[in-house]
Image: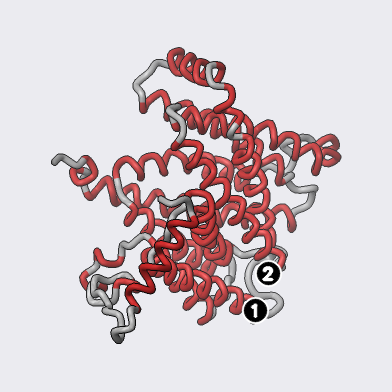
Amino acid sequence: MYNGKEQVSWRLKATLLCFMALQNACLNLFARWSRVKAQTEPGPGYAKTSVIVVCEALKIFVAFVLLKFSERLSFSETARKVYRETVGFPMEAAKLLVPSTLYVIQNNLVLVAAENLEGPVLAVFSQAKIFTTAMFSILMLGRVLAPRQWMALLFLASGVASVQISMMESKDGEGDAGEKNVLYGLIASICACCTSGFAGVYFEKVLKGSSLSVWVRNIHLAVIGVVMGVVAAFARDGEQIAESGFFAGYNNVVWALVVVQAGGGLLVAAVVKYTDNILKAFSTSVAILITSAVSVMFFSFPLKTMFVFGAAGVVYAIFLYGDMLKQFTACKAMPTFLGGEVKVAPKGADGGGALEDDVEQALIDKSGRA
């Protein structure tokens, strides 16, 4: 049977890999760099809440364009479709109040984390969203994780802990010129991952129960995000905005951050359409390497052994959780719970395998008798 993804040329896949990796790396680097410039240059610096509003506004345009080209409509037809699916299904749009508000909170927390963590550390800590998404998927969607996925979460937690330890060993004066409060940044990053995980799973649940276009849904999300973002901006930074203006402190780095964050939707759509999970995992892994390399070369980031081990553990966890290691010949000889194809028989004859089956069945029964 014809499979469109199999027919895609390696050149297009390589191009998408490069752009996705660069987008992920630039997001971490620009987030950190923009906060360092805001802290070290004269003036009030940009208001973090205002950037979220601009990003959400740009996402409306991006989602509108994606809807137009995905359904081959004219601009007027696209506008009418959005209007019909908004006015005709008001409760469907209202369901997105929760995830949209959480995404606004998450994006603000990411900038708080970027204010206190250097780029490579931010890139590694942000992968904790795999853990939070998995937990919320179990609780809200009734999913059951395989032993391999639990092992991946263990490697992920160990990797993040190793990076945390490496940062506790850092000396004053190392790294870039920005503030470095690792504990505060870690808390902000974990909270961002929790809001991201819950919002993502909630959004998935809403999508499964609706026939509306995913891009119309994204427009609804972004419109609500603009409203919530404006409320947050004037509630938290109203005095600064009134005194200096909404776009005060915006420079080339801030605008680059806005474009990179909002334009990520285009790349995600292309990756989903033309490639597979292996490329997405590669792009995330390459992004961590790019972020680390750039930070070492240009921002004096101290590359410590514990950080390297921790980052390697996180990269391994990404591939293990997605069951993608068996694609590599060298990994096929490993046990299945480590990503290979070798099944490990239960030891003894005391029903070890049956016990595992009973535990899995209990999880299924608890989650809704799937």
Instruction: Give the camera-side residue of 343 and 236.
Output: 343
Instruction: Give the camera-side residue of 201 and 345.
Output: 345
Colour scheme employed for the rendering of this structure: secondary structure
Residue at 70% across / 39% down in the picture?
50
Image coords of residue 347 (percent x, y): 30, 85
Image coords of residue 105 (percent x, y): 67, 46
Distance from Cα at disc 2 to Cα at disc 1: 10 Å
Image coords of residue 129 (percent x, y): 53, 58
Mark 2 touching mark 1, by CB under 8 A? yes
Image coords of residue 96 (percent x, y): 59, 34
Number of other residues with Cα within 10 Å of mark 2, as a class: few under 14, some 14 to 19, many 20 or more: some
Residue at 54% across / 34% down in the picture?
59
- Label 1 belongs to which residue? 170
Figure quadrant of residue 94? top right
- Label 2 belongs to which residue? 182
Mark 2 is on which residue type? Answer: Val
Residue at 45% across / 18% down in the picture?
78
Residue 285 in view in this figure: no
Instruction: Give the camera-side residue of 298 and 105.
Output: 105
Q: Is residue 166 left or right of residue 22?
A: right
Secondary structure of the residue carrying tag 2 is helix
Q: Earlier in the sequence, mark 2 or mark 1?
A: 1
Residue 101 in view in this figure: yes
> Measured along the vertical axis of the image, is residue 100 above or below residue 194?
above
Q: Is residue 348 left or right of residue 76?
A: left
Residue at 80% across / 48% down in the picture?
44
Secondary structure of the residue carrying tag 1 is loop
Q: Is residue 282 left or right of residue 7?
A: right
Number of other residues with Cα within 10 Å of mark 1, as a class: few under 14, some 14 to 19, many 20 or more: some
